[in-house]
Image: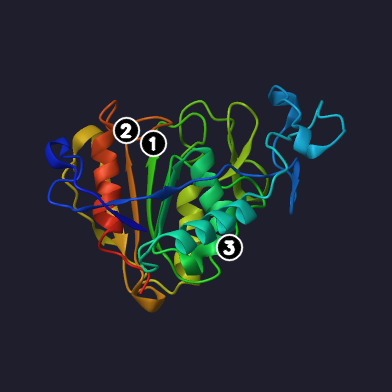
Amino acid sequence: MYLKVDFGEAGMFPGDSHFPVILLAINNLRSDGPNGPICDPDLHSDYPKYASCGAYDVDGTCDWTSCHDDVAFTEMLLYEITSTFCVDLNHIYMSGASNGGMFIYTRALPALSSSLASVGPVCSSPLRGFNFLPDSPVNIISFHGLNDRTIPYSVDGPHNLGPGPDGTVIAEDGWYYHIESEHLAAIREKMNCKPDPLPYQTHMDGVHGWTCSLWSGCDEGKEVVHCHGEYGHDYPFSNRYIEGVMIIWDFMKTHART
């Protein structure tokens, strides 16, 4: 989705006369997923009970979100914006970090990918049983730190508790996360991408071990990029967030819906 602006001397997106509007929502997941519990409730503190979930006891459960329908909210938001403004429907993007990236994997891809040009999950992976596949091909660029202790990159990462059920990794606070690289492999297989990646160059290559790979040849000409480096549960490059945002935008602005 584009809005026409001029950043002038701000220079956030040099040379661009457009900037991305990022759509973001928080997951509406409950204690048990399609394959059973999404955590070990003995390993984490109970989250507050939200009024939207009605009256029930959250103690000893994995419940952690509201019970609002964030897909419906996002669809209504898109409808409101596209009904009010002149929007290029081939350039609607979505990005989010942590919970926001989980929303992309668990809610947006299976329900909204036909409306999206590109998505950019950051430091994210779906919880056990919520590793759904896109309902149609979509461009993806993902970031994940190798030292992420909140949503572990792999079972070999620091301070996680090893393998969990259904091919997950157990985070140190008890949540069962699918391994993002394996989930992306399943998405690429669904979209019939070429099996062998190519290097994907960015202006930050080598900084904190930063490297990216590109899988091309997916259905409808879509592409998948995955980047990682030596950092934790955050955007890359320490407090230089703009560098990561610019990498996402450089990908998105060249990857339209059609």
Q: Quadrant of residue 92?
A: bottom left
Marker disc for residue 110: 3
Instruction: Left or right? Give the position of 241 relative to 75.
Output: left
Residue assigned mark 1: 146
Q: Position of residue 111 (x, y in %)?
A: 59, 63
Marker disc for residue 230: 2
Disc 2 or disc 3, which is closer to the eye?
3
Q: Position of residue 132 (x, y in %)?
A: 60, 59
Instruction: Left or right? Give the position of 194 relative to 203.
Output: right
Q: Is residue 196 above or below residue 65?
A: below
Which mark is first along the chain, 1 or 3?
A: 3
Question: Is residue 125 shown to the viewer in this render?
Answer: no
Query: Which of 76 and 163 lies nearest the eye of the viewer?
Result: 76
Q: Quadrant of the C terminus?
A: bottom left
Which mark is first along the chain, 1 or 2?
A: 1
Query: Which of 119 and 39 lies nearest the eye of the viewer?
Result: 119
Marker disc for residue 119: none
**Amino acid type, label 1:** Leu
Please tell me which residue is depicted at 44% across the width and 63% down the height of the picture.
Answer: 116
Disc 3 or disc 1, which is closer to the eye?
3
Q: Quadrant of residue 13?
A: top left
How far apart are the alpha carbons under marks 2 and 3? 30 Å
**Amino acid type, label 2:** Glu
Label 2 residue SS: loop
How far apart are the alpha carbons under marks 2 and 1? 5 Å
Q: Residues within 10 Å of mark 3 (few under 14, many from 20)?
A: some
